[in-house]
Amino acid sequence: MTETRAEKAQRLVDEGRVDLRVPGPFLAQGFVQSGRFTYIVALYPNGHYVCDCAWGRIHSHTDDLCAHALAVKLVVEPMVP
């Protein structure tokens, strides 16, 4: 059985593969290690999560987030009041 994006996102968080940083122009920036690659997910002030993976580059303008962006969202949301 294949893993859903939500399940993969939760696994990435549980395994400690999300490194969250707060750089300049972004609200937050996460680095997600998945397989051999590290993906960069930016959270913009307008609330959009944008990942540099193939799925994220295509679907970043929608709410259909990739697992990497979902993982960063899982880490960020509890921190936002």
Image: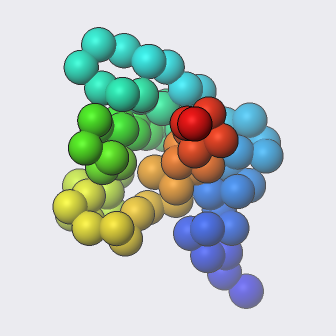
Question: Residue 33 at x, y = what percent?
Answer: 57, 38
Residues 40 and 49: in front is 49
Residues 10 and 80: in front is 80
The residue at the far top in this view is 24
Q: Is residue 46 above or below residue 24?
A: below
Q: Is residue 28 above or below residue 21?
A: below
Residues 66 and 63: in front is 63
Residues 77 and 60: in front is 77
- In which quadrant is the C terminus drawn? top right
Q: Tell me the residue at 37%/71% (across/down).
A: 64
Q: Tell me the residue at 58%/44% (across/down).
A: 77
- In which quadrant is the N terminus drawn? bottom right
Question: Residue 52 at x, y = what percent?
Answer: 31, 44
Q: How is the image coloured?
A: rainbow
Q: Is residue 42 above or below residue 8?
A: above
Question: Residue 34 at x, y = what percent?
Answer: 57, 46
Q: Which corner quadrant of the image does residue 80 belong to?
A: top right
Q: Is residue 36 left or right of residue 8?
A: left
The residue at the far front in this view is 81
Residue 17 visible from this viewpoint:
yes
Q: Is residue 79 left or right of residue 30?
A: right
Q: Tell me the residue at 68%/67% (across/down).
A: 7
Residue 50 visible from this viewpoint:
no
